[in-house]
Amino acid sequence: MFTMENLEPYFNNAKMKINDIEFILTKVEELSGILAVWASESYKVYASPYFEGISVPVHVVDSNNQEIGTDASHIEIDNFERYCKVVQTLASKESEGRGCEIILKMVEPIEEAAIKVPECDIEELTKESYDLYELAVFSAYGMEYAVGTDEESQAAAEEAIKNSAWSFRPEFIASHTKAGATNGMIKAITALQETCEDCNDDILSLIEDIEDFVEDAISADGRGTFLATYDSDEIEIKVNGIDYYCYRLA
């Protein structure tokens, strides 16, 4: 059974369009209780799942709260996608003849974060087929950004550091070896680095505690240095109480 509780992650996040009018799923409190309302400046579509024993009742009103139509589905709903389809079907039927053909467009929280960086509309945002250490990559206006949660960004930065360990200053690498930052170790690392990426595995084998190495690198330079190849900046954006981090790639 799909209820209001199941809608919680989608409030102020899920969006749909009725022709050129954009609706957003909101939660409102009225005398009849807490309701799910798809709202725009011109129309409201009341569609609270399993309200008063009905799977999906739909009530469409205009900006003056004048009723456009009501309908309901008594078929049991078990997921958000099916709920949206029912709302789409019933609201389209009730608004027939008023130029309100509904086209649902879901905006995921990570997409909401991504569009805030270049300040673009969701239609102008493209999710690329590739990633950056499993961070999703988006593009708009000729710019590319990798986006992820704090946990995802931390994991990505760790992988980036491990893959580029060879490029760190010899003194920094040596300080994380068993021998320490001795002249001999620094010279040995410097010689290894002449082969660039090819020596990365050798450098990693010298590091005594890779987790400490990663932690010190992030503490010193920040995650943006290793992920934001364009400007080394880390941009923090909060969406629905979740912190997302964006890194410009191009």
Image (tube, rainbow, N blue to C red):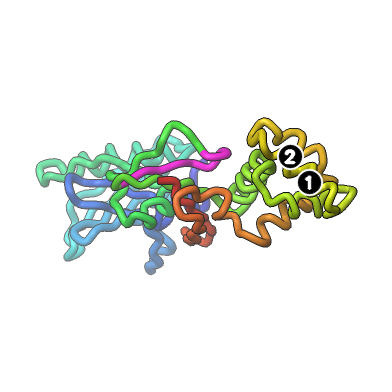
Query: Residue at coordinates 17% horizontally, 61% vertically from top-left?
Result: 66
Q: Farthest residue to the right: give it.
A: 179
Report the Cα–Cα distance between label 2 and label 1. 6 Å
- The quadrant holding residue 125 is top left
Nearest to the observer: residue 224 or residue 9 = 224
Q: Residue at image x 49%, y 58%?
A: 233
Q: Amino acid at mark 1?
A: Lys
Per the image, label 2 sits on a secondary structure element best described as: helix
Q: What's under tag 2, amino acid-wise?
A: Ala
Q: Is residue 53 visible?
A: no
In the picture, measured across the screen, residue 89 lies left or right of residue 79, that is left
**Secondary structure character of the magenta stretch overall:** strand
- 10 Å crowding of disc 1: few (<14), some (14-19), many (20+): some
The boundaries of the magenta stretch are 132-140
Residue 166 marker = none
- In the displayed structure, would residue 65 be above or below residue 114? below
Instruction: Please give the name of the residue rendered at 62% of the width and 59% of the height, measured from the top-left corner.
Output: 221
- Percent across and percent down for residue 76 are 45, 36
The answer to whether the residues at label 2 and label 1 have Cβ atoms under 8 Å apart is: yes
Say if the magenta span includes residue 70. Answer: no
What residue sits right under mark 1 in the picture?
187
Left or right, 5 with respect to 192, comes to left
- Residue nearest the viewer, comparing 229 with 134: 229
Q: Is residue 209 above or below residue 221?
A: above
Q: Which residue is mark 2?
A: 191
Farthest residue, direction left: 97
Q: Quadrant of residue 105?
A: top left
